[in-house]
Structure formats: structure tokens, C-alpha cells
Image: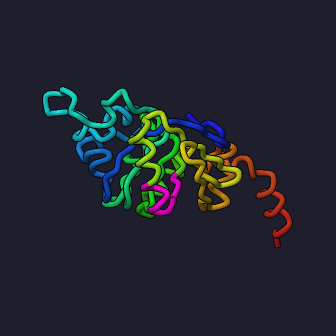
Amino acid sequence: MKQPFHIIESTCVPLPLENVDTDQIIPARFLKATDKEGFGENLFRDWRYNPDGSPKDFVLNDPTYGGCVLVAGRNFGSGSSREHAAWAIAGYGFRVVISSFFADIHKQNELNNFVLPVVVSEGFLAQLFKSIEADPKTQVRIDLPNQTVTNLATGESEHFDINGYKKYCLENALDDIDFLVQSKDKIEAFEAAHRH
């Protein structure tokens, strides 16, 4: 569901693995579906469950961790460009993914699905993982209007970049079509002014 995005404070789910690809995020066998429903329950399916459906020792199965922020290692979302990976992340309930590097297409797919990818320095990411390990109740504060992310355990804060159009869409809970509909009067005025 689309919700306006301004400031979020949340505990985190740590996934300190590098090069997590889209096939690990959502295995290929789940790609037959064409709508977004139900993808969240299969997020990291093969890491979460054995073939018989019993749970594995994996962070999403650990009640110690929770919240709407996933903290991931470098190069998150590499591999194939499947949008289903972003559907699964959003469907599970994550609103933010923090990493030191995202694969470009996956980063865009997250933004298109109202998940904010926050790129931080390697040092900030390492410190955040340390804080969460020391205290699973560690919270982060993501301030989209000011484009800052703060580790509330240490007070350390960093600025992050985001495309201005995508920022506007997130703040106003608009997808690309909503934005065009909202801009209809301006488009029509432009068309009228430029008719020959």
C-alpha cells in the first residue's frame, strides 16, 4: 500500500552479506505471478525455509530482530533485473533498505515500489551492523525531506542522495501514473500553448 514517506524511525533487520542477488531475494520459481500479492512471504525463501517448509536459522525467522528497515551488505540486488525482488521486499513490509552499494536496476525497482534504498559509506554501514549486533533494539532514523540517515545508538548521521522526482513521488505516495494524472492540467496547458 502506498503511504507518504517522510521520517521513519525503526529497528533493523541485519543481513551482513555482500552480493545478495535478486535470485536469492526471490527465487526464479516464484516469477510466474504477474501481480504483487503474496511475494513478501517468499522473500529470501530458500534461506528461510528447508524444502519441507520447516524454518532455517535465518535472520527473518529470528524474533530478536524486526522493523521496517533492512540493513544489507555491499552490492545488494545484483543479478537479473526482475522487479519481483522489489515486490518481495515491499510485500514483506520493509520500507527502507540500507547498503553501501545497490545494483542500479534493483535500486530503481525499489523506488518504483515505495521502498527507499539508502546508500551509506562502508564505515557507516559497518558501525550500524556493530550497533545492531550489540543491541538488536538499535533504531535508525531516516529523514527523507533532509535526506539523512542516523544511527540512533551512536548519533552518527550521513546524507544520502535521491533523484528529486523520486523523492517527490515517495513524499506524496505517487507512482509514475499518479504523477501524470496529478499533472494533467499542466500537461494540457502546455499542449494548448504549443499547438500550431
| Quarter holding residue 187 | bottom right
The residue at the point 60 percent across, 48 percent down is: 155
The residue at the point 23 percent across, 34 percent down is: 57
Q: Is 92 positioned to the left or the right of 141 in the image?
A: left
- Region of the chain picked out in magenta, as a range: 117-126
> Residue farthest to the bottom?
196
Q: Which quadrant: the C terminus?
A: bottom right
Q: How many numbered marks appear?
A: 0
Placement of 36 over or under 76, stated as above or below? above
The residue at the point 48 percent across, 41 percent down is: 69
What color scheme is it? rainbow
* Residue 145 image point, x, y percent: 70, 50
**Observer-nearest residue: 89 or 196?**
89
Q: Is residue 187 magenta?
A: no
* Residue 143 image point, x, y percent: 65, 47
Placement of 124 over or under 84, stated as above or below? below
The residue at the point 62 percent across, 55 percent down is: 166
Q: Is residue 121 magenta?
A: yes
Placement of 37 over or under 176, stated as above or below? above
* Residue 123 image point, x, y percent: 46, 61
Q: Which quadrant: the N terminus?
A: top right
Q: Is 148 positioned to the left or the right of 23 in the image?
A: right
Q: Is 20 positioned to the left or the right of 107 in the image?
A: left
> Residue farthest to the left?
52
* Residue 39 image point, x, y percent: 37, 36
> Residue farthest to the right?
193
